[in-house]
């Protein structure tokens, strides 16, 4: 795959699965070390730390190898040599949109179909079971969309930016962002603030041990943090929120709003982008419910007539 990938997908960065590599640790180190909780914990802390830079990773990895006399261990040596193919720090310039654990995704699909499909069945049985598995997923999707359209998560700060986030993102993503806003407000401190020619350079202290630098270009609403969370996941980090809060920003800058995380990405059946806190009275709520339903029916009709131009024309008429 490593040879074929750059030829077939020249613009793609191929990455090895961390999960698969890490599941091999036990078998590779064998015996005593495999059962050593402390070793496992220390190794995991290095490998899975999303905020570790390349240099820090290399220092920590090598220190651990020395501590457990694994410097000459064939497998660990090899894993270190190919570190740029699986360690997070070497991918922090690639926009991953949170897709860090592709295995858990494919495995969960695998699990879903595995539960519904009988491997010894006939082709016909397979097809029926496959259809019901898909139907189940569609049902889940519809449920999540409906939940997102009718419920609004409670705010945890009086900040306008939090309200803005809740109106933009799906509930699931909003909870992640809410955590970042909260942490940015309560566990991050500005330890230094310097005015450079075209931006302000912040040093953000998170807890006692971690420190990050954030460049803030107010003019073009750019906020760049050294932790690289936005590039990895597609949502702003707590350090960026600490800076935005310091500047009294009320909205998330447009360039940091990734459409795929927004309510509009899945909920087509919305009359307009105005998503204020639920309707104040019954008529308003009823109107909203009917509008949502109408849009949903409308989209179903479009889907039914799609690929058939005469039907589409008829519908348009
Ligand atoms: Zn950050």
Image (cartoon, grey):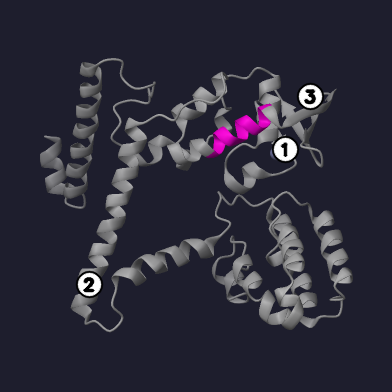
Q: Residue at x 65, y 72 (%)?
A: 21
Identify the element where label 2 is drawn. Answer: helix
Viewer-proximal residue, 1 or 40?
40
Mark 2 highlights which residue? Answer: 127
Q: Residue at x 68, y 32 (%)?
A: 240
Mark 1 highlights which residue? Answer: 225
Q: Which residues are magenta?
A: 176-185
The residue carrying mark 1 has its beta carbon less than 8 Å from ligand 1: yes
Q: Is residue 75 magenta?
A: no
- Kindly indicate the quadrant of the structure image that contains residue 213: top right
Can residue 195 be seen by looking at this rendering? no
- Please, is residue 195 above or below residue 300 in the view? above
Answer with mark 3 or mark 2, whichever residue precedes in sequence. Answer: 2
Mark 3 highlights which residue? Answer: 198
Q: Are marks 1 and 3 in contact (CB under 8 Å)?
A: no
Q: Position of residue 166 (x, y in %)?
A: 47, 29
The residue carrying mark 3 has its beta carbon less than 8 Å from ligand 1: no
Answer with mark 1 or mark 3, whichever residue precedes in sequence. Answer: 3
Query: In the drawing, does residue 44 fall left or right of residue 259?
Result: right
Query: In the drawing, does residue 77 fall left or right of residue 126?
Result: right
- Please, is residue 111 above or below residue 210 in the view? below
Q: CA distance from mark 2 to mark 1?
A: 49 Å
Q: Quadrant of ligand 1?
A: top right
Q: CA distance from mark 1 to mark 3?
A: 16 Å
Quadrant for the N terminus in the image? bottom right
From the image, state whether disc 3 or disc 2 is nearer to you. 2
């Amino acid at each position: 795959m490593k040879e074929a990938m750059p030829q077939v997908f020249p613009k793609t960065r191929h990455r090895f699965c961390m999960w698969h590599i890490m599941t091999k640790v036990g078998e590779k180190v064998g015996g005593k070390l495999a059962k050593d909780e402390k070793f496992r914990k220390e190794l995991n802390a290095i490998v899975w730390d999303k905020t570790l830079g390349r240099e820090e990773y290399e220092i920590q990895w090598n220190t651990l190898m020395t501590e457990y006399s694994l410097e000459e261990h064939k497998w660990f040596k090899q894993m270190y040599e190919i570190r740029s193919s699986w360690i997070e720090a070497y991918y922090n310039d690639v926009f991953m949109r949170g897709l860090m654990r592709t295995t858990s995704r494919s495995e969960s699909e695998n699990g879903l179909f595995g539960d519904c499909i009988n491997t010894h069945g006939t082709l016909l049985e397979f097809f029926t079971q496959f259809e019901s598995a898909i139907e189940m997923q569609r049902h889940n999707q519809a449920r999540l969309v409906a939940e997102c359209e009718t419920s609004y998560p409670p705010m945890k700060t009086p900040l306008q930016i939090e309200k803005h986030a809740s109106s933009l993102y799906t509930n699931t993503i909003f909870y992640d962002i809410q955590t970042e806003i909260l942490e940015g407000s309560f566990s991050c401190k500005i330890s230094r603030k310097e005015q450079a020619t075209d931006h302000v350079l912040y040093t953000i202290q998170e807890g006692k041990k971690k420190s990050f630098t954030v460049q803030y270009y107010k003019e073009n609403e750019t906020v760049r943090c050294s932790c690289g969370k936005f590039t990895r996941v597609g949502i702003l980090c707590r350090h960026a929120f600490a800076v935005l809060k310091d500047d009294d920003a009320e909205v998330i800058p447009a360039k940091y709003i990734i459409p795929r995380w927004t309510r509009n990405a899945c909920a087509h059946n919305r009359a307009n982008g105005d998503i204020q806190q639920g309707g104040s009275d019954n008529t308003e709520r009823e109107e909203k419910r009917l509008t949502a339903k109408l849009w949903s029916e409308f989209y179903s009709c479009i889907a039914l007539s799609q690929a058939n131009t005469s039907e589409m024309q008829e519908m348009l008429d």
